[in-house]
Image (spheres, helix red, strand yellow):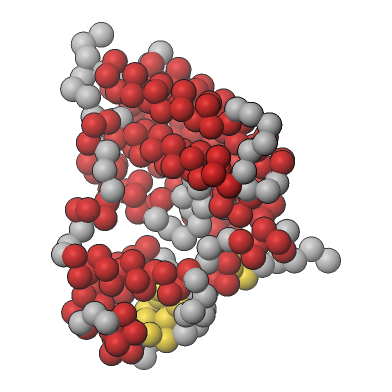
Amino acid sequence: MTERTPTVVRVESNKTKSGGAQTIAAELGLRELILSGELTPGARLSEPSVAERLGISRTPIRAAMARLEDEGLLELIPSGGYAVKAFTEADIRDSIEVRGTMEGLAARMAAERGVSSTDLDAMRDCLNDIDKALKGRDKGVADLSRYIELNDRFHRMLHCLPGSPVLERQIARATNLPFASPNGFLQAQAEDETAWVSLTVAQDQHWMVLTAIENREGARAEAIMREHARIAFRNMQLVLRNQHMFEQLPGARLIRRRMPR
């Protein structure tokens, strides 16, 4: 087949493309206040109070609030302004489903359009590094952090493979939905042995989808990525049912848990 121009080399943080430094600082600062629990669900936000708290002028704060509303961390309220949003398990499940659907589409389009050997080699290198991170018996926080870093890189590479900026933007929106990212619940699971088994299964799926893409098997590649997202469902259920893990989860206070009877 005729090789396409490599696309993976374009992978970069979305944040570097968005707005000025002050708006980025406001967005990061406000997100941290929300995820740390300093701003609780239902709390109404005013531009002056947030600007004073972060030491940033109101214009970047206004832009940051609009972006976080787009991501789903904030919601518009009828009387004007924004409030911190709470999430049910159903909300999170739907967000993960949307992300998995979009990533499945990316995998299918990449397989059908064809991928350059340069891109395939880059993804293999990433997966080989993940294999190394999963080896050994005494795995801990450092190993999990390495896995999370590499897992994020693999998924962002996948998003770029079809060479479609339109699809990339839509996947970015889906991935930014609260708790929807492939790593959304992993940070809380470093001490759980069964979680590492789950990561091994996920890594096997990574290799399978890459093979399917290389073999131009679009339907298979899509099905694998849809199934791959189901691992995030399991991680969610595990964390939300375990109080210790739940307390380690960034943004835990935003979630309304349905506790077993």
Q: Quadrant of residue 217?
A: top left
Q: On screen, 44 above or below 72?
A: below
Residue nearest the viewer, comparing 9 with 94: 9
Q: On screen, 86 above or below 17?
A: below
Q: From this viewpoint, which residue is outermost toward the right? A: 261
In the picture, the quarter occupied by the N terminus is top left
Using the rendered image of the protein, determine whether residue 3 is visible from the camera's viewpoint: yes
Q: Quadrant of residue 6?
A: top left
Residue at image position (41%, 66%) is 72
In the picture, the quarter occupied by the C terminus is bottom right
Q: Position of residue 130 (x, y in %)?
A: 49, 30
Residue nearest the viewer, comparing 245 with 97: 245
Q: From this viewpoint, which residue is outermost toward the top? A: 1
Q: Relative to 60, is 239 on the left or the right?
A: right
Using the rendered image of the protein, determine whether residue 100 is visible from the camera's viewpoint: no
Q: Quadrant of residue 149?
A: top left
Q: Position of residue 155 (x, y in %)?
A: 41, 37
Residue nearest the viewer, comparing 96 with 8: 8
The image shows a total of numbered marks equal to 0
Residue at image position (39%, 23%) is 125
Residue nearest the viewer, comparing 235 with 173: 235
Q: From this viewpoint, which residue is outermost toward the left? A: 20
Q: Position of residue 99 (x, y in %)?
A: 45, 47
Residue at image position (57%, 72%) is 253
Residue at image position (43%, 58%) is 177
